[in-house]
Amino acid sequence: MAVKTENQLTSVVAVNKEGFVEYSAKCFVDATGDADVAALSGVTFHVGASEADIAEGCAAELGQMHAFGTMFRVRGVDFHRLFTWLKAAPHRFVEHQFGVMSIENVTESYEHGEMCVFRVLIDLPDGRTGPVQVYNLPAKDEAILLGPYCGCTGSGLDTRDLSRGQETLQAGARRLMALLSSCPGFESARITYVPDVGVRETRHIRGMYVLTGMDVLKSADFPDSIACGGHPVDIHPLPPDVEHMPMHHWRFHIPYRIMVPEAVQGLLVTGRCVSATRMASGSLRPTAQCMAMGEAAGVAAAICAREGITPSAVDGASLSRIMISKGAIV
Ligand SMILES: Cc1cc2nc3c(=O)[nH]c(=O)nc-3n(C[C@H](O)[C@H](O)[C@H](O)COP(=O)(O)OP(=O)(O)OC[C@H]3O[C@@H](n4cnc5c(N)ncnc54)[C@H](O)[C@@H]3O)c2cc1C
């Protein structure tokens, strides 16, 4: 529950092992991913695709949301054996659309202990093939996998959908591992961890600024830029000219105002639910951008608490300079 005095958020009531606990603060940062605190506080938002997103060519229907997914962890991968097989059967190696690493690059990075991502094409029981996305981890036999059976539909705001999604994805991970047991390098691999159902999209808040696809594509400059993003737009469908833009194109500025809700004071919202169109969100929602926004939201909240001001009164240009002094690329 959110407690407000007029339009100022003053406290949040949470439930934990002590029961109902009320937390008061001069400024809150909502980092729930789904803008839960913002929604409880009366911030304006829409869920999934809006009419503007359909007009931008980034959604087929109103409210459309990304599928749930799971990236599960395995151990016991024999990467040398996998790489040898992929070199002998190059059609099985698929460059990751955002990674553009060749099998030689991947092998070299692996030997240097660096993380890389690539896709392995496997045969499916129905006669088709499907790509398994492989992320190697610092432990030499460990990987994170995302592939066939690792996705399903549902709303991240519906607890029944979330429970169903969890069951489906747990089973999907086991099904994919069973298939991989005949793939060179994965014969002895076993699942070590399947995380909670992964939600890619729910609410998008209405902030003091709405970042658009054009802002991202044209790398629009903002006086209150708190970070630069570098991830291509990761949504489906995508207008073809956007999908085929070369990797080096992707550098865009993230303005502070997309984290400041229009209607409620004393609150900042960070992460995948910031104020942006679906196309812009496709570039904002990957992890690095969310981390950068989260850091800036924390700094802005500290300024609010220290100076007794609300987030909308924070000078964006000064915040940008503070972020630069902390090493941010704005
Ligand atoms: C299947 C899948 C694959 C992905 N692959 C990639 C990828 O390859 N590369 C990439 O960069 N990004 C990837 N992403 C996207 C990226 O992981 C997310 O968009 C990003 O983590 C969102 O960050 P966030 O901080 O907004 O939300 P989250 O990371 O979801 O963090 C929100 C946190 O708040 C917690 N929380 C929520 N409500 C409460 C509450 N009431 N009390 C306490 N805690 C609460 C949640 O448990 C969660 O830990 C992927 C996402 C998914 C689902």
Image (spheres, rainbow, N blue to C red):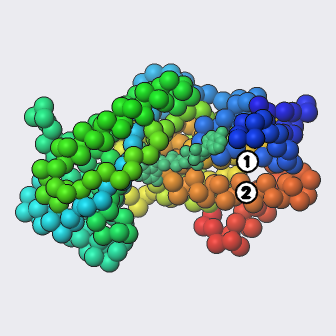
Asked which secondary structure carries label 1, the reply is strand
The picture places residue 328, in percent across and down from the top left corner, at 63, 67
Q: Which mark is residue 2?
A: none
Q: Amino acid type of disc 2?
A: Gly
Hey, which residue is sitting farthest left in the picture?
A: 88
Q: Residue at x 36, y 36 (%)?
A: 169
- Say left or right for 320 vs 133: right
Q: Are marks 1 and 2 in contact (CB under 8 Å)?
A: yes
- Within 10 Å of disc 1 (Cα), the crowding (few <14, some 14-19, many 20+) is many
Q: Which residue is mark 1?
A: 29
Nearer to us in this view, 164 or 121: 164
Q: CA distance from mark 1 to mark 2?
A: 7 Å
Asked which secondary structure carries label 2, the reply is helix
Residue 162 to residue 183: above or below: above
Considering the image in quadrants, where does the N terminus appear? top right
Q: Which residue is mark 2?
A: 298
Of mark 1 and mark 2, the one earlier in the sequence is 1
Task: Examine the image and state in which quarter residue 273 appears.
Answer: top right
